[in-house]
Amino acid sequence: MNDSADELRMLADSVVQFARNDDTLTRTRALHKGGAAFSRETWSTLADAGWLGILVPEDSGGLGLGLREMAVVAEELGRARIPEPVVAVAGFTASVLSACDRKAAASELLSELASGATIAAVAWQEDPTDLDPATTHCRATHEGNAIVLNGSKCLVLPAEADVFLVSSETDEGVALYSVPSDAPGLALERRQQVDGSWVADLRLDNVSVSADQMLASPGQGLPALERGLARAALLAGAELTGLAHRLLGMTNDYLATRKQFGQPLSSFQALRHRAVDLYIQHELMQASLRHAFRTLRPDSPLALEQRLAARVKARTSDAAMRIGRESVQLHGAIGFTEEADVGIHLKRIMALSAWLGNAAWQRRRHFELSRNTQQEVA
C-alpha cells in the first residue's frame, strides 16, 4: 500500500478499536429507553480522537483532511452502529461552515465543533416534501442595528444542537445565520425518528441576531448549503455501506450456526443464493463509493460533487434497504424483535436512507443534474 492507503487504514483501525471498547448496541438501547439519542460524554471522546475535526481547517483547530478520510470514519462508525450524529455534524455542518464566506464567524464555530464544545445543526428545510435549499421562506429583515428572523424550519438534525445554522431569504439572496438554541423567540418541537434519533421543527418569531452572527452573506448562503448537502449525501452513503456490511456479516454468521432438520441454514441452496445476492449488493455500494472518491479532487466543481453524491446516495440507500429487509427475513421471527441486533441496524438504515432524499429522489436528482450538464456542453 502507498502512504495514503496506510493512513486511511490506520484511521479505520482507530475507529474499530474505539468500537471494540464501546458496546455501542447496548449503549444505544439504553439511551433510547431513557429518551436520549446519544451521549455527550461519548461525543467528547469522539472529539478527543480528532474525528469531529477531520473536515475542519487546521487554522480553525481541525485536522484539515478531506472527504475521503471522513468517509472512512463514517463507514466504520456505521459498521459499529454508533448513535452519535457524526455525519450530520462533523460532515454536513462542518462542510457548510467551511464554505461560508464570513470566515471569522464560521471559523469560531468550526473550532467549537472540532473540540466537541458545541454541537451545531443546519436548519435549511422548510417542507418535508421539498429538498431544494433555494426554497426559503424564512425571512431576514433589518431593524436598526439588528437582523430579525421570522419563519420555520423542519427535520433539523440533531434536535439537541446547541446552535442552529438558519438559512434565511434577504433582498440579495439566501444568507446563513448562527442562532443559539436558547435564543428569545425560537420555539423548538422535537420528534423521534424510527432509529431513536431526534429531529427538531423550529419556529422563529422575531429572533434577533447581530451582524457578527452572519455566517454566509446574502447570496452566498445557497452555494454553501449546496456544497454541504452534496458532501453530507456522500458521507451518508459511506455510513450506509458500513451498516450494510455489519448486517451482512451478522446474517451470514446466523445462517452458518442456526440449524434446521439437523443442517445449518447455510447448507440450503436457496438461502445461499439469497446471501450471495446481498453480497453483490454490498459490492455495488462499495464500487459506487470508490468511483466517487477516485473521481473527486479537492477543487472539483460543485456540479460534479452533486452528481456523484446523488449517484452514491441512490445506490447505497437502495442496496442498504434491501440488505436490511432480507437480513431480517433470513433471521426469521427473531429478526423482528427489539432484542435482535439486525432490527436496530435496519432502523438506522431506514432513517439514514431517507435523510437528504431517498433513492428515488436521488435518481431523479442525478438525471436532472446530468441533463443540465449535457445542455451546458451543447
Image (cartoon, rainbow, N blue to C red):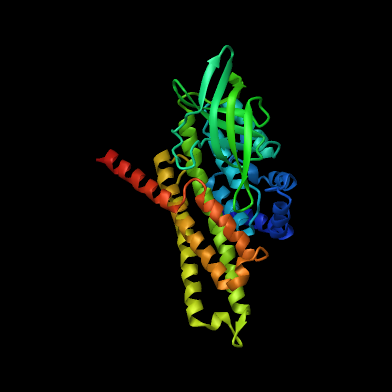
Vertical relation: 341 (above or below) 359: below
From where the camera sits, is residue 61 visible?
no
Q: Please name whichever residue, 205 or 244, is drawn nearer the observer in this view of the structure.
A: 205
Q: Position of residue 230 (x, y in %)?
A: 47, 43
Q: Please name whichever residue, 3 or 155, is drawn nearer the observer in this view of the structure.
A: 155
Q: Residue furthest bottom?
A: 262
Quadrant in the picture for residue 60: top right
Vertical relation: 369 (above or below) 255: above
Question: What quarter of the picture does the N terminus occupy?
Answer: bottom right
Q: Residue furthest left?
A: 378
Q: Please name whichever residue, 189 or 103, is drawn nearer the observer in this view of the structure.
A: 189
From where the camera sits, is residue 243 visible?
yes
Say which residue appears at 61% left-offset and 65% top-offset. 342
Say which residue appears at 44% left-offset and 20% top-offset. 171
Disc tally is 0
Q: Position of residue 170 (x, y in %)?
A: 47, 22
Say which residue appears at 66% left-offset and 32% top-offset. 181
Question: What quarter of the picture does the C terminus occupy?
Answer: top left
Left or right: 14 in relation to 355: right
Say which residue appears at 48% left-offset and 55% top-offset. 317
Q: Position of residue 92 (x, y in %)?
A: 55, 41
Q: Position of residue 275 (x, y in %)?
A: 51, 73
Vertical relation: 185 (above or below) 54: above
Vertical relation: 40 (above or below) 281: above
